[in-house]
Amino acid sequence: MTFRTLERRVQGQKTSDGDGVKLTRVLTHDLQKRLDPFLMLDAFGSDESKDYMGGFPDHPHRGFETITYMLEGRMRHKDNAGHEGLLCSGGVQWMTAGKGVIHSEMPEQENGRMEGFQLWLNLPSHQKMCSPAYQEFEVHSIPQVITKEDVTVKVIAGEFMDTDGAVQRPSTTPIYLDLHFPTARVNNFELKIPQHLNAFIYVYEGSLTLVEDSSIETIAQGEMAILNNDGDQLCLSSNSKARAIVIAGQPLHEPIAQYGPFVMNTQQELMQAVRDFQQGLF
Ligand code: MN
C-alpha cells in the first residue's frame, strides 16, 4: 500500500455560463487530458439570486455525461424528449447525453442559497451515440456510510466500504464521493483508489490534510488537488469541520475533440454534431 501524493493544486477560474450564472470552473479545458475521463467540473455557490436566476436555458449536449450534484437549492430540468424533473438539496442527476439532448436547467427559487457541482464525464467512442438517458436520485436514495472515525461519506458513484454507489459505469469506473468531516477531533479517511485511475479532490468547506508516505499537504477551501498516479491509497485528515468531493475514474486514452457542449473524438464528428443540431435532429 502506497499513499497518493499531491501533483498540483488548482484554483479554478471564475466565470459565468448559461444566462449569467456565476461559477468557478475548477476542471478547465487544459486539464482534460490529465484528468481523462473527466472533461469539466464547475462549482457554483451563491446566496445572491442575481448570481443564478438566469439559469441554463435550452442548450444541447452530445457525446458525454453530465452529473449535477445539488448541495443546496432547487433546479428544474426539462428536455426535448419530454423528460422533466426537479433536483433538490442533496440530490443528483446523472444524464447520459449520448447522441444528443436539448435541455434547460433552471432555478426553482427566487432567493436563498444555490450551491452544487456539475461534472462532465466522457463516454468511450463506441457509446458516444447511444440513446440519451437520465438517472435521478433524491437525497435519501444516495447511499451513505459513516466511518469508524465519524466521516460521513455519500457514495454517488463507485463503491466505498462494501457499499455500492448510486451509479456504476463500466467503461470509466467513476468514483464520486462526498465527504463530511465532523467538528473538533482528528479524523482520518482512507480510500483505495487503483493506481491507474486519475483522481482529484475538491475541498468546498474548511481545509483538509493530504497524508503522504513521508509528508503532509494542506488543501484549502476552494482548491482542487490533483493526485499523482503513484499509489493506491488516498489518506485525508482533518481536525475541524470540512467537506470535500473525491473523484476518480479510468482514463479512456482516446482523442478528445470538443466544441462547446459537444465532445467527440474527431473534428469531423464535431462538424456532424453541429449539422445534426442545426437540422433539428437532436
Ligand atoms: Mn446542460
Image (tube, rainbow, N blue to C red):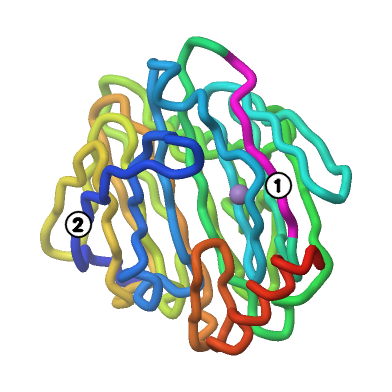
Prevailing secondary structure class for the magenta stretch in the rendered image: strand
Residue 219 percent location from the top left of the image = 20, 46
Region rendered in magenta: 101-109
Identify the residue position indicated by label 2 in the image.
9
The one of 134 and 22 positioned closer to us in this rendering: 22
Q: Nearer the viewer, mark 1 or mark 2?
A: 1
Residue 23 percent location from the top left of the image = 37, 39
Residue 278 percent location from the top left of the image = 70, 66
User: Looking at the image, which residue is at 16% across and 46% down?
Assistant: 218
User: Looking at the image, which residue is at 66% across and 44% down?
Assistant: 58
Q: Are marks 1 and 2 in contact (CB under 8 Å)?
A: no
Q: Of all residues shown, which one is farthest toward the front?
A: 279
Which quarter of the figure is the C terminus placed in? bottom right
Q: Confirm whether residue 149 shows in the render.
A: no
Element at label 1: strand
Quarter of the rendering containing residue 182:
top left
